Image (spheres, helix red, strand yellow):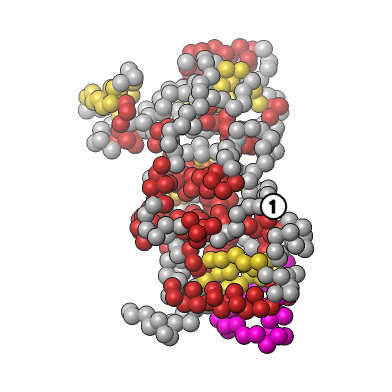
Amino acid sequence: MQVNQKEFEPVIAAFCCNWCSYAGADLSGTNRLSYPSNVKIIRVPCSCRVNPMFILRAFQRGADGVIICGCHPGDCHYTSGNYFTRRRMTLLFSMLDYLGIERDRTRVEWVSAAEGAKFAATMNDFTETVRKLGPNRRLEDLRCRKQ
Amino acid sequence: MQEAMIKRAKELLAEGIVNRVIGWKRGEFAYDSTPAIFETPEELERDFVYDDLTASNLSKYLIKESRKAGKILAFLKPCDTYSLNQLTCEHRVIRENIHVIGIPCDPKIDAEKIKAKGISGILGIKNDGVDLTIDTIYGKESMPVSEAIMEKCLSCKGKKHVTYDELIGEDGELCDSGRFDMVAELEAMTAQERYDFWRSQLSKCIRCNACRNVCPACTCEKCVFDNDASGIANKAAADSFEENMFHIIRAFHVAGRCTDCGECSRVCPQNIPLHMLNRKFIKDINELYGTYQAGEKPDSVSPLTSYTLDDCEASIVHERGTE
Ligand code: SF4
Ligand code: SF4
């Protein structure tokens, strides 16, 4: 089957921490900045709530890219959560890369509650990156594929 | 060696310092061995073995054993002592209830490698240091020892015990066996090649869970993979996604805690090089957060339960990636 790049609309799962990035997304909305509707936001209490399994599950259920957004290092509502996120995600992404799964499908970005513009810009950029990669095939579950 | 071990075990039993011994006995066949508990001198005399085939790491059994009444004597090879230290560090064993005798270790022999040479019906294996003489029901066979060495012993961390109460024989030295070379080779390939390599390996998995069950770092009473509702408790072969998921998560859960004992790869009936997943994490940790050897000390802090303010960002994976 030929994948028509033009028609392909990637699905992006964005895990956003309640205190910074989710509020940042909100701000980008109230400021009427646009970011693609491809992005599906999942609110989590802290970026370190994101279990590696969540990321794999997102890919399984049809995500083509997964981005984790949290408070800037030093600004975590729980003091140190995002420092743990940083180590975990670095190692996890490196492992995905090692298994040959395109590393550009995953990203961590720090977005504060005041950075509505950064949120929109990040999502635009990430969506375009994933769009170029095409559909996620290496970490998909055929049983979950939409016809 | 076996004689000296039995002798010392009997003494400790007689003195009442320990009330049982964990070691190995012959398994179903002449070429395998299985962990066993011995309570009397007679049992030791009859069944206790220590030879080229006693490869299993006894540390994990000590989680339950160290909670029973009385002290247990455990014979640990150098690499097994890392596992025990790691378990002590995680408060999974009661170290005071274990009397550890460190024993020297020569590379173990992998019966599978002998069988792979077409030698079957094995009745016994003799090792003169250079060649193996294998007694079979069809007569005698021989092959060089070097071709039958167990995979995990080829990349041994060293012969130094990191914890023990007494030693039999001499303590050895640490060594660098280039255990990350294969990981580096894979890293240097293209994403497509890596993907194909891992697909060819992981698609062999029959989800017997042996790798998880044997792992001295996998000690949760309830495992994520045993959750019926998760849809991953079954055989993974249903979909390639599940194979990937199981293996990524299994390796991730022991990241920073895996002592690289190699048991996972040893027990895999499908010969999947699982240690290559664990070593990737170890290598990354060493490179990104400073050299760290899990189990080296009984009180170290895992790199995944700690952090520094100036750790690299996750984007480093994108920056340093190949191809
Ligand atoms: S993952 Fe494998 S090598 Fe690491 S501790 Fe567990 S059994 Fe040993
Ligand atoms: S031991 Fe091998 S076959 Fe069994 S679950 Fe582990 S990787 Fe799969």
Q: Amino acid at mark 1?
A: Leu
- Circle count: 1
Question: Where does the image place residue B273, in percent across and percent down from the top left?
Answer: 41, 46
Q: Is B151 positioned to the left or the right of B80 in the image?
A: left
**Viewer-nearest residue: B90 or A74:** A74
User: Horizontally, is B106 left or right of B193 in the view?
Assistant: right
Q: Residue at x 51, y 21 (%)?
A: B172
The answer for which chain carries disc 1 is B
Q: Is residue B28 visible?
A: no
- B116 relative to B102 in the view: left or right: left
B172 is higher (above) or lower (below) than A83: above
Category of crowding for the residue at label 1, using alpha-carbon neighbours closer than 10 angstroms: few (below 14), some (14–19), many (at least 20): few
The residue at 46%/80% (across/down) is: A146
* Farthest bottom residue in view: A32
- In this rendered view, identify the residue nearer to me: B35 or A67: A67
The location of residue B36, given as percent across then percent down, is: 53, 29
Dividing the picture into quarters, in which one does residue A73 lie?
Answer: bottom right
Residue under numbered circle 1: B309
Tell me where residue A109 appears, x and y as whole percent.
62, 67
Q: Nearer the viewer, residue A96 or B234?
A: A96
> What range of the chain is rendered magenta?
A24-45
A147 in magenta: no
Residue at left 64%, top 20%? B165
For residue B95, which quarter of the picture? top right
Instruction: Assign the C terminus of chain B to one quadrant of the image.
Output: bottom left
Q: Helix or strand or loop: what does disc 1 sit on?
A: loop
Is residue A97 toward the left or the right of residue B128 in the image? right
Q: Is residue B54 above or below residue B285?
A: above
- Residue B86 percent across, percent down from the top left: 62, 37
